[in-house]
Image: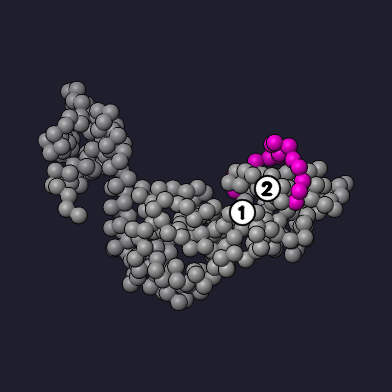
Amino acid sequence: MSVPRRFLPSIASLRALEALDRLGSASAAATELSLTQGAVSRQLQALERQLGVDLVVRDGKALTLTPDAAAYADELRHALDRIANATLQVQSAPLAGSLNLAILPAFGMRWLMPRLPEFSRRHPDVTINMSTRLAPFNFATEAFDAAIHFGQADWPGTQALLLKHEQLLPVCAPELLRRRQVTEPADLLNLPLLHIQTRPRAWADWFARHGVETEAALTGTLHDQFSTINQAALHGLGAALMPDYLVEQDLATGRLVALHPKAEDIGGAYYLVWPITRARHPGLLQFREWLAGQAQPEDPLPR
């Protein structure tokens, strides 16, 4: 793709505009960029001439951006970050390169992390850098090659590999049952329920699956991550509907007890997703091929 020169200003002038917007003064921008204030001003003037628009309001020595220029600077900030990250990858990448992966905190720590030593042994030339994200994001503005995503395989502009259907099990601390009896699903309505923000209908769907009518809004406390809801359950604050892989150890040690005979798939799964534009990334190709061997069958449970 050939882009006209007028749409590709110099990096120096773009950095000057972004720094002025972020720092609020020409002197601060000059200090950060190791330039004089005059040099910053000249970079901005050159940018204005090239674009053919006014970007800066000049009041004596004070420089401020116009509203349109401030919006432009915000877009530039994301682009400059991506350039910097891409440059860092080229400089530090081993043979197949670095793979920047966004992971969900609980799934990443409990399911993915124990498996990664095998990948490292098989592919020592691939470095995996990981950051946690709780919600989908824009691959165009975040420097990730792939992400571990929960939900459906419907992230725009991506391809996906199914890793694991989420199977949920109701659990609680043993002391919560000392004065209560749970023999059938409807009895769980007599317990304080713990809810998680990312699965707002989890309890309602679980009760519906078992033919239990519930009120329009189930009461209980709301938590933002499985790590916090797990701690709440361990301390007897209520019953939690938890993925089976997260509570295996607590069930085995008796710190939690199961309130139903088996974990069940009530919808939703974990996927590795990647932008179509990154599909040929060498490290991602190796990671996907290996991860496919760790994934469960497409539909393990009867529907």
Q: Name the N-terminal-most of marks 2 and 1.
A: 2
Where in the figure is residue 214, as x and y percent of width and height? 74, 40
Q: In this view of the protein, which residue sits in the foreground, 90 or 220?
A: 220
Q: Which residue is mark 2?
A: 205
Where in the figure is residue 28, as x and y percent of width and height? 26, 36
- Within 10 Å of disc 1 (Cα), the crowding (few <14, some 14-19, many 20+) is some
Name the residue type under label 2: Asp
Magenta stretch holds residue 213: yes
Q: Which residue is mark 1?
A: 267
The picture quadrant where one finds residue 174 is bottom right
Q: Quadrant of the C terminus?
A: bottom right
Q: CA distance from mark 2 to mark 1?
A: 9 Å
Name the residue type under label 1: Gly
Q: Which residues are magenta?
A: 210-225
Tell me, yes or no, whether the two marked residues, 2 and 1, touch with CB atoms within 8 Å. Answer: yes
Residue at horizontal 35%, vertical 49%? 140
- Within 10 Å of disc 2 (Cα), the crowding (few <14, some 14-19, many 20+) is some
Residue at horizontal 39%, vertical 68%? 285
Magenta stretch holds residue 194: no
Q: Is residue 150 left or right of residue 288?
A: right
Residue 162 appears in view? yes
Where in the figure is residue 30, as x and y percent of width and height? 22, 38
Q: Secondary structure at mark 2?
A: helix
Residue at horizontal 85%, vertical 53%? 183
